[in-house]
Every structure is written in structure tokens, then in C-alpha cells.
């Protein structure tokens, strides 16, 4: 049986003998070489495939710890606001632990695969007629007034659990990469990775800290613009956030590492999304392609040097958002059930 993530990295996490570990086999995701992408940007590229987690996104790394600690504390109910993946993860781990799970979603803005997953795992769903940021404000009220535990990344265990992504990368590469690229939404994950690398540095497990490259969607780029975005819009629904909860620590990660937080357009995101699928065989959700869109953009200015090691965090699985996959693909050719017609169409001559 796979060792739970929280056991494997126990010495770096708030896990005690009293912590009931709620695990579904999260973590230990592939660090996949991406040679074609590497050729395009002129560096050595690896993709950290976080869609291989039990609920198809990196959120599980933080959720296993947040739910385990909630159970340890005797919590009966958990709540989150979510663009979809946090809720899918919360619903799943709460089901496993036997906890009540309440999720607040921005109405009409959550990808279909996520909605399906949340329902299947029995969470109580409230569709808020507003955006993620407004839903999170309501969650802040609920936890201040009622006996319910938040499992958004404002719960410190979420970010702590997500530091394990950095540990795994270093365990494979033997050191920090030169650059790490990733999407930035509520900014918990860039905070977590940077903290993870620094934790490993303090433990003598790496000698090189990466430069952190974070990318927001152009229509939802508060950190890039230096001010909250009241009505964020992007095809990358997982990063459709106008007022990130971990704003300051994301800026810290950027500045301490000597990195960049920049914006990429929806067109750039979808181009990277299709490139990943068609050239590297990696089917991710749109938000997950933002980091790749970002390095492609930087490469246009000859940003990278040969031999640079660039890790992109591919944050969620493509099946999360089937609508975008279908909308961006060509329509199939309809033919009669005639073998000659099919062979002709395919350009096969006898
Ligand atoms: C949550 C999420 C993000 C954004 O991560 P933050 O920690 O909110 O910055 C990016 N991609 C996917 C697929 C996500 O689920």
C-alpha cells in the first residue's frame, strides 16, 4: 500500500501521534520530462502532473492535512468557498472522514467535472450569485460565527500540506530547479511551494532555490496590476480570483526568489493548453496551462538559457473542464457507415 503523503513527510508537517491521517493516496505525482516544450523554450522542462492526485488537482496535498487536523480537533463540519477544485477535494476527504461538508460556489462559473465530483461525494452545495471572492467573504463570516472549520487555504494546514509538492520535486531532481512556473489564483500554492523549498533548504536537502514564475490570467491579474479586480474574468475558471487571500506571501515568494509574477491572456492559455495535449500528451485544465503559457511568453524574449531546469506545475486534470476541451477542439466529421467512405476520408488509397 502507498505510504500516505503525511507519513512520508511527517517530520516537516504538523502530524502528531494524535493525528488520524485521512488519506486517499495523494502525492507522489509524476515529474514528467517535456522535450518538445523544452525545444520550444530552449531549456530543460519538466511537468509536475498534479492531475494524478485522487481528486485530479493539487488541492489534495493540503486537504489531506486540513481534514486530518479537523478530525483530530473533533470538528463535525467543514466549509469552503471554491472555484471548484478545493470543493471537490474537500467533499472527497470529508466523505472519507465522515464529516459534513458545505461548499460555496460562484453560480455558473464552476467547470462541469468539478460539479459532478462535488455532488458525487455528497457535499452540500450553495451556489452564490457572485464571484469567488464574495463567497470567501461569506465563509469568513460563517467560521467566525458558527462551529464550522474552514478548509480554504486561509486554513494554514492547507498551505503546509501543499509544501510537499516542492519536496517531491527536489527528491527527484536532487536539487531545486532553476525556475518553477505555475498558475496563480488565490496564491496559496505559490506560497506553499516557496515555503516548501525553503523548508528543504533549512533541512540541508537542497543547495539551490528556484526563481518562482507565477502567472495570472490577464482578466484576473490583481497581483500584476497591484490592485484587486472587482469582476475577474477568464476561461481558466480555477484562477478567476480578483482578491487573492495569499497576496502578500505570493509577492514575497516572487521577490525573495528573484522571480516574476506576470499575466497571460486567455488566448495564450488556450494555446498552451492545446499544445500540452497535442504535443506532450498532457491533458490539463485551462488554468493549469497558465504556467506553460507564461514560459512560452518569456521564451519570446530569450529569457531561458540552455541547461536551465524549468518545472511547470500542471495543477489539475483536463477532465475537470470537458466544456472547454470540446469548445476548443474541431468537430468530428460525420460519415455514413461505409468503409470506403471512411477510408477515402482518411486519405487511404487501396
Ligand atoms: C486552485 C487552483 C489553481 C490556483 O491555485 P492558488 O493556490 O489558488 O493560486 C490553479 N490551478 C488549478 C487547477 C487549481 O485548482
Image (cartoon, helix red, strand yellow):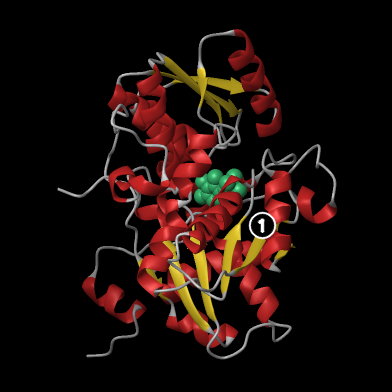
Please tell me whether mark 1 sits on a helix, a strand or a loop: helix
Residue at left offset 36%, top offset 18%: 99
* Residue 147 appears left or right of 120: right
Say whether residue 244 is visible. Answer: yes
* Residue 3 appears left or right of 155: left
Q: Most extreme residue toward the top, as rendered?
A: 146
Which residue is under mark 1? 253
Give x and y (percent) for residue 73: 40, 19
Give x and y (percent) for residue 80: 54, 26
Q: Where 231 sits versus 68, above or below?
A: below
Crowd band around label 1 with a 10 angstrom C-alpha radius: few (<14), some (14–19), many (20+): many
Is label 1 within 8 A of ligand 1 (CB to nearest ligand atom)?
no
Say whether residue 329 is visible. Answer: no
Give x and y (percent) for residue 70: 41, 23
Quadrant of residue 132 in the image?
A: top right
* Residue 280 appears left or right of 291: left
Give x and y (percent) for residue 50: 41, 55
Amino acid at each position: 500500500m502507498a505510504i500516505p503523503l503525511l507519513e512520508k513527510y511527517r517530520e516537516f508537517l504538523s502530524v502528531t501521534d494524535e493525528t488520524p491521517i485521512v488519506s486517499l493516496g495523494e502525492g507522489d505525482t509524476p515529474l514528467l520530462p517535456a522535450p518538445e516544450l523544452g525545444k520550444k523554450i530552449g531549456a530543460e522542462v519538466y511537468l509536475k502532473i498534479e492531475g494524478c492526485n485522487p481528486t485530479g488537482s493539487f488541492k489534495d496535498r493540503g486537504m489531506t492535512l486540513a481534514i486530518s487536523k479537523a478530525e483530530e480537533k473533533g470538528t463535525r463540519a467543514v466549509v469552503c468557498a471554491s472555484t471548484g477544485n478545493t470543493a471537490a477535494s474537500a467533499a472527497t476527504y470529508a466523505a472519507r472522514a465522515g464529516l459534513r461538508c458545505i461548499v460555496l460556489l460562484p453560480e455558473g462559473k464552476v467547470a462541469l467535472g468539478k460539479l459532478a465530483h462535488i455532488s458525487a461525494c455528497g457535499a452540500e452545495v450553495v451556489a452564490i450569485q457572485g464571484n469567488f471572492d464574495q463567497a470567501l467573504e461569506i465563509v469568513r463570516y460563517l467560521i467566525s460565527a458558527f462551529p464550522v472549520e474552514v478548509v480554504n487555504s486561509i486554513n494554514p494546514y492547507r498551505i503546509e500540506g501543499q509544501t510537499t509538492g516542492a519536496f517531491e520535486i527536489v527528491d527527484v531532481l536532487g536539487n531545486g530547479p532553476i525556475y518553477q512556473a505555475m498558475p496563480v489564483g488565490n496564491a496559496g500554492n505559490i506560497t506553499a511551494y516557496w515555503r516548501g523549498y525553503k523548508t528543504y533548504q533549512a533541512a540541508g536537502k537542497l543547495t539551490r532555490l528556484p526563481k518562482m514564475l507565477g502567472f495570472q490570467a490577464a482578466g484576473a491579474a490583481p497581483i500584476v496590476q497591484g490592485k484587486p479586480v472587482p469582476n475577474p474574468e477568464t476561461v481558466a475558471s480555477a484562477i478567476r480570483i480578483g482578491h487573492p487571500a495569499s497576496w502578500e506571501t505570493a509577492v514575497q515568494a516572487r521577490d525573495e526568489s528573484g522571480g516574476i509574477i506576470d499575466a497571460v491572456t486567455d488566448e495564450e492559455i488556450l494555446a498552451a493548453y492545446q499544445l500540452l495535449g497535442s504535443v506532450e500528451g498532457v491533458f490539463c485544465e485551462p488554468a493549469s496551462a497558465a504556467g506553460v503559457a507564461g514560459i512560452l511568453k518569456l521564451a519570446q524574449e530569450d529569457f531561458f538559457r540552455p541547461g536551465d531546469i524549468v518545472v511547470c506545475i500542471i495543477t489539475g486534470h483536463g477532465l475537470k473542464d470537458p466544456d472547454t476541451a470540446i469548445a476548443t477542439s474541431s468537430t468530428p466529421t460525420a460519415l455514413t457507415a461505409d468503409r470506403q467512405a471512411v477510408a477515402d476520408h482518411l486519405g487511404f488509397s487501396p
